[in-house]
């Protein structure tokens, strides 16, 4: 048998990540006063509009929220003139979005000047959010910020649960879902196609959140959420 000279052998490696699902989980400290102001604003709005079929989007039947109060489709909650909302955008929302877009899109993200569409929810015992995604055209990312949570809720009450966007992988040992614990001051950002839902909670208290979509431009049509 001839001797094979292996001195010229070699190989080149390239590791790629195909179709990643990037989720940012950022917990803010020192924002209790801001959260309380935002919560009281939502309590006030819910007190005024909970039974108003034009101002409570839950009545539309076209959204994932089941029960409780959600701000109206035709109003961008994040464009309200309240100082607390301006502070929330400047200190919490916009820095997180900038960071997330850079992580996902790289240097081209610096040229993106997104328009942020937001809405808010106030949910009580038994209220929940059905599985959904955020398919509005031009949506770059979606997210949620936890303003206020009821005390003493047992897991997974009120937890957000994401479905694996690669269902075939489940047959090969990958997990089907991923749960994330809610926490006042926590902000999540994720791809708009990442299907998710929120477990109902039991007992007294309210759950207040601000949800949002990060769009390339202001849409001509209504939002889908």
Image (tube, rainbow, N blue to C red):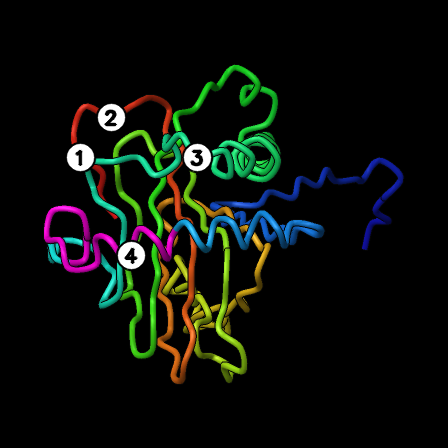
- Pointers 1 and 2 in contact (C-beta within 8 Å): yes
Q: Which one is in front, 63 or 202?
A: 202
From the viewer's perspective, tell me whether residue 34 is left or right of residue 225: right
Q: Report helix, strand or loop for mark 4.
A: helix
Q: Is residue 84 above or below residue 156?
A: above
- Helix, strand or loop at label 2? It is loop
- For numbered disc 1, what is the local secondary structure? loop
Which of the two discs, 1 and 4, sits closer to the camera? 4
Badge 1 vs badge 3, beta-carbon distance below 8 Å = no
Give how far across and how far down residue 119 sits, in percent.
Answer: 33, 45
Q: Is residue 148 magenta?
A: no
Quadrant position of residue 103: top right
| Mark 3 lies on residue | 82
* Tag 1 residue: 222
Residue 203, picture quadrant: bottom left
Eye-nearest disc, 1 or 3 = 3
Q: CA distance from mark 4 to mark 3?
A: 16 Å
> Residue 131: horizontal and vertical position, in percent?
29, 64
Going 54% across and 55% down the picture, which residue do you hit? 36
Mark 4–mark 2 distance (CA, rounded to whole Å): 26 Å
Above/below status of 73 relative to 196 = above
Q: Which mark is residue 219?
A: 2
Report the side of 188 relative to 117 (left or right). right
Real-space CA distance between mark 1 and mark 3, rounded to the nearest whole angstrom: 23 Å
Q: Which residue is mark 4?
A: 46
């Amino acid at each position: 048998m001839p001797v094979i000279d292996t001195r010229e052998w070699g190989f080149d490696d390239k590791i790629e990540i195909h179709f990643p699902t990037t989720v940012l989980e950022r917990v803010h400290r020192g924002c209790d006063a801001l959260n309380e102001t935002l919560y009281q604003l939502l309590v006030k709005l819910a007190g005024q509009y909970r039974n108003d079929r034009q101002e409570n989007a839950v009545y539309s039947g076209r959204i994932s929220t089941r029960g409780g109060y959600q701000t109206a489709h035709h109003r961008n909650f994040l464009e309200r003139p309240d100082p607390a909302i301006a502070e929330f955008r400047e200190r919490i929302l916009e820095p997180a979005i900038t960071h997330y877009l850079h992580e996902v899109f790289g240097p081209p993200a610096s040229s993106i000047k997104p328009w942020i569409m937001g809405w808010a929810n106030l949910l009580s015992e038994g209220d929940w959010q059905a599985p959904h995604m955020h398919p509005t055209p031009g949506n770059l990312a979606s997210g949620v910020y936890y303003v206020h949570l009821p005390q003493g809720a047992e897991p997974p009450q009120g937890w957000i649960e994401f479905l694996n966007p690669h269902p075939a992988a489940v047959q090969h040992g990958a997990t089907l879902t991923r749960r994330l614990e809610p926490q006042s001051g926590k902000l999540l950002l994720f791809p708009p196609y990442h299907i998710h839902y929120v477990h109902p909670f039991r007992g007294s208290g309210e759950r207040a959140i601000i949800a949002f979509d990060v769009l390339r431009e202001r849409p001509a049509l209504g939002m889908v959420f």
